[in-house]
């Protein structure tokens, strides 16, 4: 055990209730003899609170803290990204990239409230998410220790984890081995792994979550009107609604018409390329509408500079630098253009 990690007494774990984080609870207790507090955020997908809590406790956690972060996610993360028309490498609206710093922020907050000395996450050692969570935690409280079990433990396969779970009486659902790694929140879903790693392979229908494929979309187009105030969508077809309702409605609408599927090979922050597919109907509709509106409201020079700064902003967000001075300054610039 590294010296830095000796003497860890209380850990806050970003918990989803899946196989990885369930096994992590027990592994932390075995390895550090520490107390484990699970933290689960509602970022826009329905959570079964009772089931999740009982699972966390059965896995060995001392408690589960749940927090509805949807409003904060929209106002502080999604809206600034929309005002910037932020698309990573010109295409990906960054649902996952925007969600991680918020989860990290709350991990830190919960750690402070609970007097924990470390936080822990279940991200793999190959992806962007580990970077986002760790850089954000470091930015907000450099004194907190960070544990990344998937980079540290010996287990190499899902089967070994299931074996470990069985040995320690951790409840695991006997679900069919899902070949994909999926992350979902209000702004969209991200799917990777499995056959998708072959860039020649067309995404199989089972890799779609909710989006209708275009051959199932209705032949007749639907017309909608979105009203913005200072860059924030406030009315749909003239009807005032909260952004969360708007996002949900646009998602259903976009799904029906097959809008918002993104199939791309992207450059990860860790230096590898990755084939990813995304479903982000609401994000794509809103960004498209917002951009169109800006052709009317922005003068040429402001528009040019705004467009030139968008990729920079997207890179910062994607690379995990949400809590950086430049990201904040760019947000202030974009805000100024929305008057
Ligand atoms: N490549 C995307 C990103 O870095 C999606 C990551 C999805 N994460 C996951 N655990 N499936 O933002």
Image (cartoon, rainbow, N blue to C red):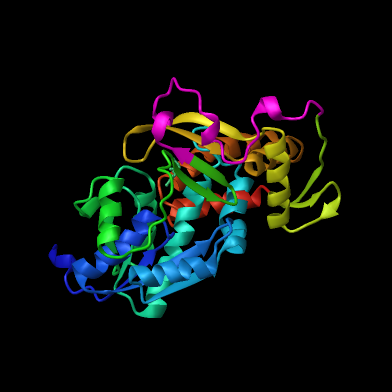
Q: Where residue 288 appears, x then y in whole percent?
A: 68, 36
Residue 294 in sight: no
Residue 155, x across and y down, in percent: 22, 50
Say which residue appears at 51% left-offset and 28% top-offset: 203
- The residue closer to the viewer here, 265 or 62, is 62
Q: Which residue appears at 65% of the width and 40% of the height?
A: 281
Which residues, given as a range, are shown in magenta?
191-220
Residue situated in front as seen by the camera: 131 or 67: 67
Residue 86 placement (x, y as % from top left) = 56, 41
Q: Quadrant of the N terminus?
A: bottom left
- Residue 235 appears left or right of 76: right
Residue 8 shown in magenta = no
**Residue 100 screen position, x and y as percent:** 45, 54
Left or right: 309 as drawn, with respect to 199: right
217 magenta-colored = yes
- Residue in view at x 82 percent, y 28 percent: 220
Q: What residue is at 71 percent from the left and 44 percent from the top?
A: 252
Relative to 328, 11 lies left or right: left
Horizontal relation, residue 234 to residue 64: left or right: right
Q: Is residue 14 visible in the rendered structure shown here?
A: yes
Residue 18, quarter of picture: bottom left
Q: Quadrant for residue 244, please give it.
A: bottom right
In this picture, is 10 found above or below 223?
below
């Amino acid at each position: 055990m590294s010296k830095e990690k000796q003497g860890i007494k209380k850990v806050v774990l970003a918990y989803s209730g899946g196989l990885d984080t369930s096994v992590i609870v027990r592994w932390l207790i075995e390895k550090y003899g520490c107390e484990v507090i699970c933290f689960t955020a509602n970022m826009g997908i329905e959570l079964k609170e009772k089931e999740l809590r009982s699972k966390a406790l059965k896995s060995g956690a001392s408690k589960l803290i749940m927090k509805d972060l949807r409003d904060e996610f929209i106002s502080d993360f999604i809206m600034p990204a929309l005002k910037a028309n932020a698309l990573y490498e010109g295409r990906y609206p960054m649902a996952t990239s925007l969600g991680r710093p918020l989860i990290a922020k709350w991990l830190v907050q919960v750690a402070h409230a609970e007097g924990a000395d470390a936080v822990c996450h279940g991200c793999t050692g190959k992806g962007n998410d580990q970077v986002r969570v760790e850089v954000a935690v470091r930015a907000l409280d450099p004194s907190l220790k960070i544990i990344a079990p998937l980079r540290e433990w010996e287990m190499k396969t899902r089967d070994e984890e299931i074996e470990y779970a069985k040995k320690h009486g951790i409840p695991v659902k006997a679900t069919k081995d899902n070949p994909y790694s999926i992350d979902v929140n209000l702004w969209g879903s991200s799917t990777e792994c499995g056959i998708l790693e072959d860039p020649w392979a067309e995404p199989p229908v089972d890799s779609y979550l909710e989006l209708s494929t275009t051959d199932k979309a209705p032949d007749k187009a639907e017309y909608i009107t979105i009203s913005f105030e200072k860059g924030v969508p406030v009315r749909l077809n003239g009807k005032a609604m909260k952004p969360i309702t708007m996002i949900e409605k646009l998602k259903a609408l976009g799904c029906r018409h097959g809008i918002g599927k993104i199939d791309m090979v992207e450059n990860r922050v860790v230096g590898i390329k990755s084939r990813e597919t995304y479903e982000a109907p609401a994000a794509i509709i809103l960004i498209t509408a917002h951009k169109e509106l800006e052709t009317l409201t922005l003068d040429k020079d402001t528009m040019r500079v705004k467009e030139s700064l968008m990729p920079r902003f997207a890179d910062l967000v994607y690379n995990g630098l949400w809590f950086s001075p430049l990201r904040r300054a760019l947000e202030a610039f974009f805000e100024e253009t929305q008057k």
